[in-house]
Image (cartoon, coloured by chain):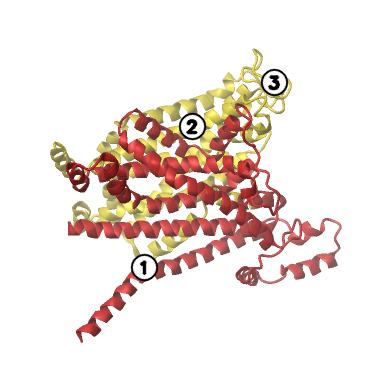
Chain colours: A red, B yellow
């Protein structure tokens, strides 16, 4: 009987642990559905008839009617939405109005390039922010620390295209000519084959990210170094570097993990402007092009992809932060 | 440490703080003061700038991308227009659109947060979920989507920036207001039958003044960011108007020959955003101090 009870408790425990996650997943799915509906409706509000836009002014009435039927534009709005959504779930994102290619193919290229850019940026950003944060914490309230705090305030306040343009001026045009100002990557080629084209766009994303994360690392290290646990380690006569790397740093990493997911979200959110600035062929620049061409299916697809990625990273950040808070509160009540 | 005494003093005072003391504490922060001074100075420059401009910002005065000279102190731009005159005239849109967007997003976001946090119920749930939907649109995304449909009109741009930034404000202020609802002074006010709106205005609002100012500074920088980015990618302020974000994209190709046409408007954008950043940072430090953190 006691064993049964124990098992029951374990099952309840697992469920209690899973439940907030499942609730979040459900809420997240509903939110994304609402996002897709909003995108669909906004795109449908576009003035002008799509069939007219494709066929031009010389089209006959008959041609227009048949194209509308072909595109499903004669169906009721809710049916169009469901068809669009159903197509996406099957991997059919429609056809580009400007060049007749399947949107899914264009999207796959864009997503790969944008993910490469964001991935490279994050891979550099995370270790670098740990390093910068620890250095700033070591020189707390000193000159290095103050310079860092000032720079991080500026880097986080200034828009991405300003950071990027200053980098272009420094490294590509005005001062030095060591890197390309425009990231030319032929369609179909991997961005890794053109590493110099990746440097400036990635750096534009890395600078504000590092400046944001390193601040959190700095505060976390300062907090941890003030705990009794670290003071004991110091009194035991452990070397400062051992105290820092073996005892302080692992504890300081925990609070920045949710923040790193947040920065991943910001990186995704910044793709439009950064990619436009460097003409980097990803989802962001594809979106700006599609807006110029009024290419509805492409606009919808790219906005949906960017918003979903941004939403998911935010959701992860939220869940991690809440879990941390919960365990932190438990730890405190125990202490 | 001596902070023990101070902390009991501050916690004691926070039981019934007055609105004035909250704002005064924020103004005592040097960073907040410098931020406000910088913003006032920039706004003044933007307002009187067009009168100081030596030339008509829309008229060519020389060859395209001419280097700085006695005639044009900062040189000319891609169409031979005077860069100095365009920089002086180019903040007009930003100077009203950014503060208005920031203020409106903070006011509506805080109002939604405080009212729904206090009353709860299903409206709270519905609003929270609707704001979640808006929160899924980062930076320029919502603005770009809607501008592509309705065209780049300044009032529409302001409305979209508010829609983009307001949910974030509501989230933060809601988080700051929820713990207040369990405080003795709120419970007491409820117990003696104080009407809800009065509690919200007199008990909750003064106690979220620091996060409100952090949000205002932050959202001001972000408004400048979104608005100038929209101009930069060609869906904000339209040519031939002079606008800092637009100037950066117009003269981008001339960066090698005439960098001032790009760097001058960039310097203005940086100064303007730093104003908001300083306010946010100063207010955040005041907040951390009152909460007893480093």
Question: Does mark 3 fall on the same chain as mark 1?
Answer: no
How far is the residue under mark 3 from the one under mark 2? 27 Å
Mark 2 surroundings within 10 Å by alpha-carbon count, few (fewer than 14), some (14 through 19), many (20 or more) = many
| Residue A275 position (above or below residue B64) | below
Relative depth, front residue between B50 and A87? A87
Horizontally, residue A268 falls left or right of residue A55, namely left
Element marked by disc 3: loop
Element marked by disc 1: helix
How far is the residue under mark 1 from the one under mark 3? 63 Å
Percent x, y of residue A57: 83, 55
Q: Nearer the viewer, mark 2 or mark 1?
A: 1
| Residue A190 position (above or below residue B238) | below
How far is the residue under mark 2 from the one under mark 1? 42 Å
Q: What residue is pinned by disc 2? A: B272
Element marked by disc 2: helix
Q: Is residue B90 visible?
A: no
Q: What residue is pinned by disc 3? A: B66
Residue for point 62% across, 20% down? B74
Q: Nearer the viewer, mark 3 or mark 2?
A: 3
Residue for point 22% across, 53% down? B186
The quadrant in which residue A46 appears is bottom right
Question: Does mark 1 fall on the same chain as mark 2?
Answer: no
Q: What residue is pinned by disc 1? A: A20
* Mark count: 3
Percent x, y of residue B194: 24, 55
Position of the C terminus of chain A, as image quadrant, is bottom left
Mark 3 surroundings within 10 Å by alpha-carbon count, few (fewer than 14), some (14 through 19), many (20 or more) = many
Residue for point 50% across, 43% down? A206
Percent x, y of residue A244: 29, 43
């Amino acid at each position: 009987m006691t064993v049964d009870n124990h098992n029951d408790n374990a099952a309840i425990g697992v469920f209690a642990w899973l439940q907030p996650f499942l609730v979040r997943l459900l809420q997240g799915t509903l939110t994304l559905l609402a996002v897709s509906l909003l995108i669909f409706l906004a795109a449908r509000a576009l003035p002008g008839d799509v069939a007219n836009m494709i066929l031009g002014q010389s089209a006959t009435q008959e041609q227009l009617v048949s194209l509308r039927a072909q595109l499903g534009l004669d169906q009721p709005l809710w049916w169009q939405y469901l068809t669009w959504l159903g197509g996406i779930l099957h991997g059919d994102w429609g056809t580009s109005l400007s060049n007749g290619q399947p949107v899914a193919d264009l999207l796959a290229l864009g997503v790969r390039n944008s993910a490469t850019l964001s991935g490279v940026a994050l891979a550099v950003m995370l270790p670098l922010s740990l390093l910068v944060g620890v250095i700033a914490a070591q020189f707390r309230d000193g000159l290095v620390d103050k310079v860092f705090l000032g720079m991080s305030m500026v880097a986080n306040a200034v828009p991405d295209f300003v950071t990027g343009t200053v980098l272009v001026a420094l490294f590509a045009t005005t001062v030095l000519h060591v890197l390309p100002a425009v990231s030319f990557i032929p369609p179909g080629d991997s961005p890794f084959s053109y590493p110099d084209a990746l440097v400036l766009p990635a750096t534009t994303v890395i600078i504000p990210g590092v400046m944001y994360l390193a601040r959190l690392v700095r505060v976390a290290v300062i907090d941890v170094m003030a705990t009794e646990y670290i003071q004991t380690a110091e009194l035991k006569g452990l070397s400062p570097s051992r105290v820092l790397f073996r005892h302080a740093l692992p504890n300081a990493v925990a609070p920045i993990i949710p923040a790193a997911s947040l920065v991943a979200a910001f990186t995704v959110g910044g793709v439009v402007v950064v990619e436009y600035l460097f003409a980097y062929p990803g989802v962001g620049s594809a979106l700006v092009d599609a807006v110029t061409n009024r290419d509805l299916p492409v606009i919808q697809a790219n906005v949906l992809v960017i918003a979903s990625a941004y939403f998911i990273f935010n959701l992860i950040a939220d869940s991690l932060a809440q879990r941390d808070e919960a365990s932190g509160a438990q730890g405190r009540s125990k202490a | 440490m001596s902070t023990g005494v101070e902390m009991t003093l501050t916690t004691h005072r926070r039981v019934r703080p007055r609105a004035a003391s909250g704002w005064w504490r924020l103004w005592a922060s040097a960073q907040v003061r410098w931020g406000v001074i910088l913003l006032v100075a920039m706004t003044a420059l933007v307002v009187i700038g067009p009168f100081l401009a030596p030339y008509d910002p829309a008229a060519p005065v020389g060859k395209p991308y001419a280097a700085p000279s006695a005639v044009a102190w900062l040189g000319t731009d891609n169409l031979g227009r005077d860069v100095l005159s365009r920089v002086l005239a180019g903040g007009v849109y930003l100077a009203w659109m950014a503060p208005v967007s920031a203020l409106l997003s903070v006011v509506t976001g805080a109002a939604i947060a405080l009212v729904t946090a206090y009353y709860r119920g299903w409206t709270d749930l519905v609003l929270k979920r609707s704001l979640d939907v808006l929160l899924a649109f980062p930076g320029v995304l919502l603005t770009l989507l809607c501008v592509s449909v309705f065209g780049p009109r300044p009032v529409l741009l302001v409305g979209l920036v508010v829609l983009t930034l307001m949910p974030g404000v509501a989230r933060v202020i809601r988080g700051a207001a929820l713990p207040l609802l369990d405080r003795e002074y709120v419970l007491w006010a409820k117990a003696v039958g104080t009407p809800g709106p009065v509690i919200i205005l007199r008990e909750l609002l003064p106690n979220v003044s620091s996060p409100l100012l952090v949000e205002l500074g932050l959202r001001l920088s972000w408004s400048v960011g979104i608005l100038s980015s929209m101009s930069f990618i060609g869906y904000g302020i339209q040519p031939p108007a002079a606008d800092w974000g637009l100037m950066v994209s117009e003269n981008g190709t001339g960066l090698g020959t005439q960098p001032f046409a790009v760097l001058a408007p960039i310097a203005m954008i940086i100064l303007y955003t730093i104003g908001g950043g300083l306010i946010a940072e100063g207010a955040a430090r005041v907040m951390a101090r009152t909460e007893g953190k480093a």
